[in-house]
Amino acid sequence: MTDPLHQELLTLAQEAARRAGELLRDGRPADLAVAATKSSPIDVVTEMDIAAEKLITDLISAHRPDDGFLGEEGASSEGTSGVRWVIDPLDGTVNYLYGLPTWAVSIAAEQDGETVVGVVAAPMRGETYHAVRGGGARATGAWEGERELACRPAPPLDQALVSTGFNYVTEVRTHQAEVARKLIPLLRDIRRGGSAAVDLCDLASGRLDGYYERGLHPWDLAAGDLIAREAGALTGGRPGERPAHPLTVAGTPGVFEPLQRLLEDFGAWHD
Ligand code: IPD
Ligand code: CA
Ligand code: CA
Ligand code: CA
């Protein structure tokens, strides 16, 4: 039976993700422009990222005024309840800016520092993924319907479909391109979807065999990491290390460790 607090947090996260997803899907201005840049000139934010984060934090605060927040667009507060919300209001901003459909709203709830609930809504796919710690992962959606998520049986690495992403900082992305160049001949193929949260949910759904990326932030990962793990995937950092920073690796059992080892061999953790 699901812990009543976790059930409450899940219901609230689902409602907030649904409403923010509708705002982003239905309210995208035709002339959407870049509002500001962050870590580099290609690291952009739009008015819609900011509006979606406000909608989510306003809704959650109205129901649970004592919770803390960590949001990509600046939401940051300690709270006193032991619950903290980790929010990426729009994961895949560059796709969204261009009108590409792969983007998502990502909302996780931590209890005493541990992620207990994760929700990722991908409105243009009509799919929402969720997990409660210890309770498995599920998805709802028009294409494959309501279903339990389970990552696929591991193929040999040369048959594995692996997704990645490239950080916005030039030196980091240049190094990651070099690592990807070495990996490509050893895998079935590489994908670059443009949303870390969707990548992790695709791994959970059996649509990918692995995923890795350098330089992610807690809000990119929190919900998708729980969903992937509850679907049976393994996630972590350097071989033997759980912290998923500065490089996150995820994969089905069988793909995870060989992928970690290859990334280590190719210097993915080096500067
Ligand atoms: C980005 C996306 C992208 C990943 C970047 C992230 P944002 O998040 O997840 O796939 O490659 O590293 O920063 O900025 O669109 O929320
Ligand atoms: Ca961003
Ligand atoms: Ca993100
Ligand atoms: Ca974002």
Image: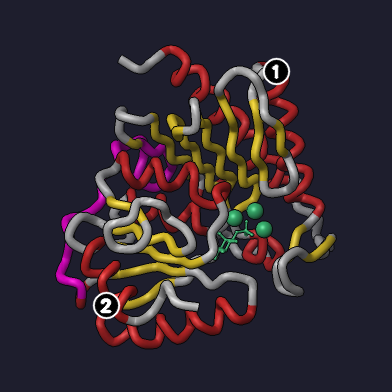
Q: Nearer the viewer, residue 98 or 158?
A: 158
Rendering coords of residue 269 (x, y %): 42, 72
Instruction: Tell me: 154 left or right of 238.
Output: left
Give the magenta part as a residue range: 138-157
Tag 2 secondary structure: loop
Q: Main secondary structure of the magenta part?
A: loop
| Whole-number angstrom distance, CA of label 2 to CA of label 1 | 48 Å
**Crowding at label 2, few (<14), some or many (≥20) Cα neighbours within 10 Å?**
some
Give the SS element for disc 1.
loop
Give the residue at x 83% y 62%.
Answer: 36
Q: Specify whether residue 131 is painted magenta.
A: no
In the picture shown, does residue 72 fall above or below 180? Answer: above
Q: Which percent across, then down, holds residue 27? A: 76, 46
Amino acid type assigned to the residue bearing label 2 in the image: Arg
Circle 1 sits on which residue? 65
Relative placement, left or right, of 206 versus 246 is left
Q: Position of residue 191 (x, y in %)?
A: 42, 72
- The residue that appears at 41% across and 50% down in the rendered structure is 201
Circle 2 residue: 188
* Residue 64: quarter of image: top right
How far from the left and from the top, in percent, is residue 47? 81, 52
Q: Who comes first in sequence, dot 2 or dot 1?
A: 1
> Looking at the rendering, in which quadrant would you find the N terminus?
top left
At a point 41% along the width and 81% down the height, the residue shown is 180
Say if the magenta span includes residue 150: yes
**Amino acid type of the residue that numbered disc 1 sits on in the rendered structure:** Pro
Total numbered labels: 2
Q: Is residue 215 left or right of residue 189?
A: right
**Callout 1: CB less than 8 Å from ligand 4:** no
156, above or below 246, in the image: below
Please give the name of the residue rendered at 71% of the width and 64% of the height, measured from the top-left corner: 97
Q: Residue 139, located in which quarter of the rendered image?
A: top left
